[in-house]
Amino acid sequence: MNDTASEKVPFWLDPKKRAIFFQFITLCMVGLLAYYLISNTLHNLKKQNIATGLGFLHKASSFEIGESLIRYSAASTYGRALIVGALNTLYVSFIGIIITIILGTFIGVARLSTNWLLSKLAAIFIEVFQDIPVLLQLFFWYSLFYTTLPTPRHALHPLPGLLLCNRGVTFTVPKADPAHGYMAIAFLAGCVIVYLIRRWAKKRQEQTGQLFPIFRVSAVILLGLPLATWWLAGAPTALSAPKLVGFNFTGGMTFSPEFISLLLGLVLYTAAFVAEVVRAGIQSVSKGQTEAAMALGLRPGMVLNLVILPQALRVIIPPLTSQMLNLTKNSTLAVAIGYPDFVSVANTTINQTGQAIEGVALIMVLYLIFSLLTSVIMNWYNKKAALVER
Amino acid sequence: MDKESSAISEQSLPDELIIEIIDMHKWFGDFHVLQGINLTVHKQERIVICGPSGSGKSTLIRCINRLEEHQRGRIVVNGIELTSNIKNIEKIRMEVGMVFQHFNLFPHLSILENLTLGPIWVRKTPKKEAEENAMYYLEKVHIAEQAQKYPGQLSGGQQQRVAIARSLCMNPKVMLFDEPTSALDPEMIKEVLDVMIDLAKEGMTMIVVTHEMGFAKSVAHRVLFMDFGQIVEGNTPEEFFENPQHDRTKLFLSQIL
Amino acid sequence: MANIAKPSRKEEIQPPVVHVGVIGWIRSNLFNSWFNSVLTVVSIFFLLKTVPPFIRWAFIDSVWNTTGQACRHATGACWSIIPHNYRFIIFGFFPYNLQWRPLLAMIMLFVLLFFSQNRKHWNKSLAYSWIAGLVIMGLLLKGGLFGLKSVDSTQWGGLLLTLLLSVFGLTAAYPLGVVLALGRQSKMPAVKTLCIVYIEMIRGVPLISLLFMASIIFPLFLPEGVTINKILRAQIAIIMFTAAYIAEVVRGGLQAMARGQYEAAESLGLNYYLTMRRIILPQALKIVIPPTVSILISAFKDTSLVVIIALYDLLKTTQTVLSNPEWMGFSREAYLFVAIIYFLGCFSMSNYSRKLEKELSRGN
């Protein structure tokens, strides 16, 4: 009896065996290519007397870095220099992300406003800043510093406490005082108190139905406690104002032209994309939801909080994190205007040690880590927030 | 069924007026969508509004709870004048329940949470009381076992019944229905109409925009025909379907019956 | 029953004046609530503070065709930098008297793009026209045949180089991206893993690291004596980068395809190649045209990064002009000019993409 299941099929017609054969060929080809490239590379490196391996991380760097969050000098190692670069990247990305989210949300909401003027202005902002390359925007802002802004002697004074000149942007800041430490503690204590009050108010509402003005009370506590602490600590009002000494300013807090241009360029560019993400998110909630909520008698504020935002945020957050990752990747353009971010420092390191492969590999690894972390957090959020459906 | 339902319609209505609409006009830009509407609705009265699409039927009932704004004329609901005064609007919305063609349940909340949202945040009811209230109405619409599910897990007919229960939880004086069965598959229409008939039996004041003429015949006190923004004619169901007065009405009835 | 409304008289009742016409529009769009009224006033104030000074700087006080020195005496914008330098900004180091060739190539490109807009023209002959067009464009740039003088690729620059990198970049990246997407969907674990690793790695790193790789590391991969010119290396990096993003977009299209399509093809006896080529890809690729155009727009903007590895694209030629002592300091004007070029390009592409998306969602 012929049993088709056990009939012998020649291996070139059996799909499973064909698949294995195909993969074998593919892997061989990839392997051969890799072997070819690697052997060429090793040969060329030897010929040019370039070292391999990460030993250079322990050598002294012998270059200065313009801005650093930790102590660093030309005598520090390359490894430390790279850490300074990474911290600078995180610094500008972190501040950039916060400002971008605020600005982007505002513009996205303005785009949907019933006010025609506001809506059109927002649309123009979005279109203009999305369609110009971010590098060009960086160059433009940077060029303003050295072509338009005056020297420190003639610095612009648009607002009290703010000075603009070609050395950077300088703010008057309060002078360091122990009271500030107490204020920070008071703020943290306020956060804890607000959390406890919210829990209590929610319980009260469940039991008696009465609403508690949580928002207003939280605002008062978070603002009032630090303020009260400040007053109790002697109300120190001493300011550190920038003073012109020689050709530059001392005192106050100065941000370099490189930092400001990078921040400005990244924020304006990314905010335009964030605005579109926010707009799409809000529009994804159908009008019927608002109508049903209003028909129940809910006030606009409650409609927003209870019905619209929960649904809109589900649509907004994945692309929003993607934009935040883009901002971090775009911060690598700092190398073009001289802000010492990770790529900038790595570039200098490559130039000095000649170890291009290790340098570029380090750059790729750092940003791959950022990307992977973001992916993981995103997947976790998506699972958690998914709407339950059939 | 027929004897019972004609008995429903023939009960004499109380004198109390729930809704008064006096010479109401509405424009969308230059388009005169509602032209001089005059309508009074007594307590426990049930009105069905029919008409071709674009005649303004949905716009009319949406003006009653201010989902649309009228430009001329007066609307009075339960003695409260409907103006741009927010306080009046909120009071009126607590007394008026609305059921939408596309249900509009909140997909991110469970069925129970959908029902307790209004009572907790608008009527300031304690949570336990709101949930008991919600379960009572879920029982009434025969869907109590789905309380912990989410809207995405229910069929269209089930969702619409939940939507009706959601409005009932606010204890409204009048219920507005905007084509409640138009978005449903045929086999689910009956379950929703049955719930609406139960509601009628209990004496709820209802204004229903629909094409379901069987429902109109069995439950309505009055059937109104609207065309081009005007109420062309209105009469008891018997008179309306047997002796339509205007040509436009006759044309419409010939198309749908 | 009492309350039947008589049909109202035929005369037209007009809506209240306050609700129509110009006044009505202003009331409902600018001042429909006190909050909006405040916003309108603030916005108008902001516009009054910024727009007139800008117009004065850019148009009224500006000079349009003078020398660099004369510019420094003007209070307004010095637009003269453009008429004096536009040929370098747009064509780079291309020999002056041969610049009709890249100009012709660019015109061909725009004509092809314009013609490709209309979806009714999408057929085989358009594809062939594109291939022929690209070959002719390449010929015009490189020369060496048909009596055209040979121009070395190191002399290609400016807008010419930007367009070259974008157009050839996307053209080559597209098939590569499709292959990667198909590979990622494959059931063969080796192929699937290779594709996933490639796609996720390339998407996770900044473009600049790939450009560095192209600029410094590619030469190490080659045996002694073999060199590839820098533009080609940068082009390869851009192709590799763009292909990974296209792969993700195409994957979305493939996943959106109903399972039934694959099953119908299988039951007809079509093999893998035929299934993909005739049934699946035509539909999937059509679905993802809007995001693909979006990738094209990004690629166009991203070519500006080659400035960092010292290739003379549109941005770098502009910067070179600014480093000329005669024109130093007029960076605002120069960058604004370049920004307008990029803006026109990107805006028309994104406008087209929106239009296309509307057409496609309406169901053809």
Image (spheres, coloured by chain):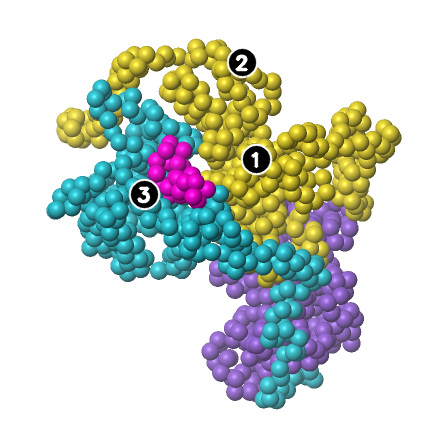
Chain colours: A yellow, B purple, C cyan
Give the crowd class for mark 1: few <14, some 14-19, many >=20 residues within 10 Å: many
The residue that disc 1 covers is A257
Q: Do callouts 2 and 3 mark residues in contact (Cβ within 8 Å)?
A: no
Q: Residue at x 47, y 51 (%)?
A: C70
**Above or below C109: residue C326:** above
Tag 2 subunit:
A
Q: What is the distance, in whole Å, between disc 2 and disc 3 at their CAs?
A: 42 Å
Q: Amino acid at mark 3?
A: Gly
The residue that disc 3 covers is C92
Q: What is the distance, in whole Å, between disc 1 and disc 2 at their CAs?
A: 25 Å
**Left or right of B50 on screen, residue C273:** left
Tag 1 subunit:
A
Disc 2 with disc 3 on a shared chain: no
The residue that disc 2 covers is A76
**Above or below A112: residue B58:** below
Determine which of the numbered discs, if any, sits on residue A79 in the image: none
Magenta segment range? C304-328
Q: What is the distance, in whole Å, between disc 1 and disc 3 at their CAs?
A: 30 Å
